[in-house]
Image (cartoon, rainbow, N blue to C red):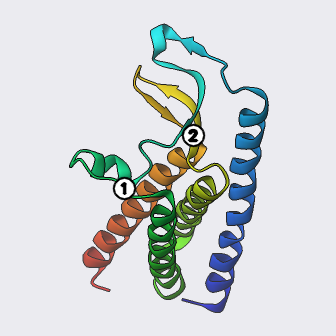
Amino acid sequence: MSRTKRYETVRLFGLIPLIVSLDMAVKLIVTRFFMGTKLLLFGGIIGFKPHINREQMGINMELSRLGMSISNEANIVVNILILITVGALLWRLNYKRIYGKPFAVGSAIGIASCICSLYDKIIWGGSPDYIYLLNKYIIDLKDIGLVTGSLICVITFFKTERDRKKTGK
C-alpha cells in the first residue's frame, strides 16, 4: 500500500471520534428528554420507544438462553478485549492490504460502534436504545453501525479477494 493510501486509511479512521460523538449526543438527548415517550408507526413496524437495555446486553443475550449471565463489569472487560482484538485486526488489514476506502470506512464505523457499546455499559450500565423495529426489537445508531460496518467490510473483503483471484495477483 502506498504512503498516500496509508494516509487515507489513517484519515478515515479519524471518523471514529465523530461517529462516537454523534451517537453519544443522540443518546444524551434521548435519555434526558424523551425517556418514557412512545411513538409507534405502521402498527409497530417502526417507531420511537426509548429504553435502557440492561437485560440483554451483548453476550448476556446468548448466555441467558443457557440460564447464565455475567455482570456489567465483566461485560465491560469482554468488550474491551473484543475492541482491542478486532480493532488491531482491522487496523492491520487496512494498513497492509489493498481493500480500499470502503473497507476502511466499514472498519471505522464498526470500531466506532464498538466504542459506543463500551461507553453505553460504562455510562448508562446498559444500552440506551430508542428505534423500535418489527414489533420486537429496540435498537440504536450503534447497532445499525455494527451491522453496516460489518457488512461493508465482509462484502469488500470477498469482492477484493475474488477480483484478485481473477487477475492472478
Q: Is residue 104 above or below residue 10?
A: above
Above or below for 22 versus 91: above
Q: Are marks 2 and 1 in contact (CB under 8 Å)?
A: no
Whether residue 5 is situated above or below residue 110 in the rendered picture = below
Q: What residue did someone put label 2 on? A: 140
**What amino acid does circle 1 point to?**
Ile
Q: Residue at x 59, y 65 (%)?
A: 108
- Neighbours of disc 2 within 10 Å: few (<14), some (14-19), many (20+): some
Please state if 28 lies on the left or on the right of 56 as rendered. right
Residue sticking out furthest to the top: 43
Q: Quadrant of residue 127?
A: top right
Q: Nearer the viewer, mark 2 or mark 1?
A: 1
Residue 111 in which image quadrant: bottom right
- Residue at point 23% right, 47% down? 67
Is 50 in front, or is 69? 69
Q: Which residue is mark 1?
A: 59
Image quadrant in which the N terminus is located: bottom right
Q: Quadrant of the C terminus?
A: bottom left
Nearest to N terminus: mark 2 or mark 1: 1
Front residue of 74/39: it is 74
Identify which residue, 164 or 64, lies in the foreground: 64
In the rendered structure, which amino acid carries the disc numbered 2?
Asp
Residue 139 placed where, x, y %?
A: 51, 37
Position of 138 relative to 74 (above/below): above
